[in-house]
Image: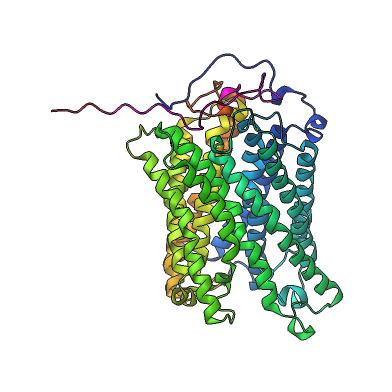
Amino acid sequence: MSAAPTETGSEPRTHYLNDGYGIKSWLLTTDHKRIAILYLISITVFFALGGLMAVLIRLELATPEGDLFQPDMYNRLFTMHGIFMIFFFLIPGVPAVLGNFFIPIMVGARDLAFPRLNLLSWYIFNIGGIFAFWAMMHGGIDTGWTFYTPYSTTYASTHVLPTALGIFIAGFSSILTGLNFVVTVHRMRAPGLTWFRLPLFVWAMYATSLIIILGTPVVAVTILLVGAERLFGVGIFDPALGGDPLLFQHLFWFYSHPAVYIMVLPSMGVVSEIVPAFARRKIFGYRFIAYSSIALAVLGFLVWGHHMFVAGMSIYAATIFSILSMLVAVPSAIKVFNWTATLYKGAVSWETPMLYALGFIGLFTIGGLTGVMLATLGIDLHVHDTYFIVAHFHYIMVGGAIMGYLGGLHYWWPKITGKLYSRFWSRISAGVIFIGFNVTFLPQFILGYLGMPRRYHSYPPEFQVLNVMSSAGATILGVGYVIPLVYFIWSMRYGKQASSNPWGAVGLEWETTSPPPTHNFETQPVVSRGPYEYPPPKEAPVVA
């Protein structure tokens, strides 16, 4: 069966997009699909802000001398870049947009369990973003996105409190979303939809929600303690006040390493949907992939110490964290192996979502392998706080999380909007993003290994060639990100009408109209088979 998109000339008479046209109908909606669109708009704005700062950072680093920004301004740029990208794009990205839109449909429900809480979470997210945006417009913050103490609590003269308050508020949005997902998966599945008939995207979002619910309160309390010490001089983290700065690092990284899986696990779920759809095969090792999502959620809480190998940690504790950090690579490796096995002898169709999925697998694998390197004590001590760390982190977050997010948008865009985008330009953009990403971040592995520290606005002249290459790659990458924005907007008005199942995929979301009706299904669906029951691909005839 071909996976090429098909078209139909008839648009559904009623669907969620034409269920009220005024701004008020959107701002007061409790429809999970409309709330997903609202989130899409919000996080795209924050992604644009973070991306603009990344462009300015790479412009500065094109020359060895700090000739574009003063050191203090450069500190504010990379700090705000990290804050907007991590807390206001990567963490909410796939769950808030694709999770919000598709989890109820994938489990055969009319909406999420708590529709009003869902709308409230969007408002809370934007209130938090407004605080962070206000801080940026009034001079920003220069502590780094990690808020390391005692600098953030005692010595920084920038807008630490409003930025921290914005992140604190946005955390409640994540908690409400995660709670909504967990209850929906437990209580609102369609008849016949047992746990091991759930799509793997739902498994990934379920595991992500557990991390959000358990981990986000920890970082929220940590940020609250930073504010208390900064406002009232309470001795919690500042040694001059009787505090312990390492306590902050333990609390912060106890959340922030699991937060890596909040960012990347949903994209893994997206890839688990795309690969069987475009390989026309039942996914290999369904249960192993499902269990590996839960394993990542559990093991992610046990490895925070590898961020602190140079912070004076006991060699015995460091050894335990090193072993656990290598162990956490196993569930990710299981996923990569099973995706690859699914592709083996499949009737692979090179549609745009598949290009993003393959890009995810390749880039995430590089990020994962370098993560195992950083779990090794000797290597970590050498490259800690260098551009090797920057490259590794971006291979996971940009090469992984964003590639998966874009793959999911391209896969489900016909379902979300009922319109087809340009196949030609979408393939071009996937190629441009892949090339631009590697040209940007591969040189940074070399720079880090050679000893170039991160967060410096000037560097020795011998590093310029690699930095110019990285800055040129960032330009290519930026163009690659702009292209989908253009053709997605274009498709809304001029795109051809999509059928209910343009890819010939399986799953409940493909059994309703494009776009879906307000309550997702005209009648309650009943599930009687597994999630990836594709007919076996025909083998090529043997030529004697």
Instruction: Using the image as rendered, state which of residue 497 and residue 436 is in the foreground.
Output: 497
Residue 453 can be seen, yes or no = no
Give the quadrant of the C terminus.
top left
Looking at the image, the residue that sits furthest to the right is 232
527 part of magenta stretch: yes
Work out whether 99 lies above or below 508.
below
Residue at 50% x, 37% y is: 273
Q: Position of residue 529 (x, y in %)?
A: 51, 28
**Left or right for 6, reference 127:** left
What colouring method underlies this structural image?
A: rainbow
Q: Where is residue 495 in the image (x, y as percent from the top left)?
A: 56, 25
Q: Position of residue 277 (x, y in %)?
A: 46, 33
Looking at the image, the residue that sits furthest to the left is 544
Work out whether 75 lies above or below 261.
below
**Left or right for 347, reference 476:** left
SS assignment for the magenta stretch, majority:
loop
**Left or right for 490, reference 240:** left
Residue at 76% x, 58% y is: 168
Work out whether 157 lies above or below 131.
below
Residue 316 can be seen, yes or no = yes
Q: How many marks?
A: 0
Q: Give the range drawn in magenta.
A: 511-539
Instruction: Using the image as rendered, state which of residue 429 and residue 9 is in the foreground.
Output: 9
The quarter of the displayed image where residue 346 is located: top left
Instruction: Using the image as rendered, state which of residue 235 and residue 88 is in the foreground.
Output: 235
230 part of magenta stretch: no
Give the quadrant of the N terminus.
top left
Q: Position of residue 187 (x, y in %)?
A: 70, 37
The quarter of the displayed image where residue 349 is located: top left
**Left or right for 442, reference 304:** left
